[in-house]
Amino acid sequence: MSKVVSLRLNDDQIERLQRVGRQVGRSPSETAALFIEESLRQREFAFIQFRDSSAGRQACLQGTRLAVWQIALLAQNYEGDIAKIATHLELPATQVVSALRYAAAYNEEIETAIADNSWAAAHLDSLVPGIKVLEIDTSAP
């Protein structure tokens, strides 16, 4: 369910909102709703911020270049071991926990991003013709 909320913006804010809306292919109302939702999520989850990327707007871990879905994928590989994930990323465990809490709360969003990444990895040779992919042996100590 959604409700209409009226708010008053000055001319400069409207112009800026329209510009951003054009850049992301959304109406000013849709853009405002997106920004409000992102702001609410940032208040609810420490260390989370939203950034534009080639894949669209993504939840990211503040102070890093990591998207939350990347941390969630790493967590799958480390079977959810926070200490191992934090050590691997050289980050405080509190940041990892925050990212994983966000991932749990917005599981569908994160799982979709992971699936999109998996698809791209499987089709890398057609997406980037002539690419040479290096395999790394992770079983060595």
Image (cartoon, rainbow, N blue to C red):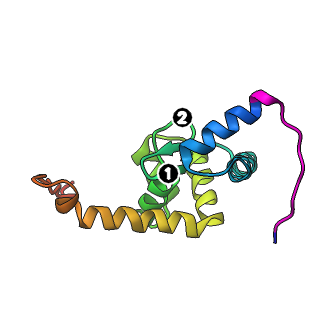
Circle 2 sits in a helix, a strand or a loop, which is it? loop
Quadrant into which the C terminus falls: bottom left
Name the quadrant of the N terminus: bottom right
Q: Which residue is rendered at x = 51% and y = 43% of the image?
A: 52
Residue marked by disc 2: 63
Q: Is residue 108 above or below residue 53?
A: below
Q: Report x, y in % for residue 8.
A: 89, 39
Query: Which residue is drawn at the image coordinates 76% and 50% (left, top)?
Result: 40
Q: Nearer the viewer, residue 140 or 54?
A: 54
Relative to the observer, which residue lies in front, 118 or 74?
Answer: 118
Q: Which residue is mark 1?
A: 56
18 left or right of 61? Answer: right
Magenta region includes residue 105: no
Query: Where residue 135 sits in the image (x, y, percent)?
Result: 15, 57
Q: Residue at position x 57%, y 70% from top?
A: 108
Type of the residue with mark 1: Gly
> Viewed as shown, does residue 40 lie left or right of 127?
right
Q: Which residues are magenta?
A: 2-12
Query: How far is mark 2 from mark 1, CA to CA?
Result: 19 Å
Q: Which mark is residue 121?
A: none
Q: Position of residue 118 (x, y in %)?
A: 34, 66
Q: Earlier in the sequence, mark 2 or mark 1?
A: 1
Relative vertical location of residue 111 with respect to residue 48 in this rendering, above or below: below
| Residue 94 visible | yes
Q: Quadrant of residue 21?
A: top right
Magenta span: chief secondary structure: loop
Q: Amino acid at mark 2?
A: Gly
Residue 49 quadrant: top right
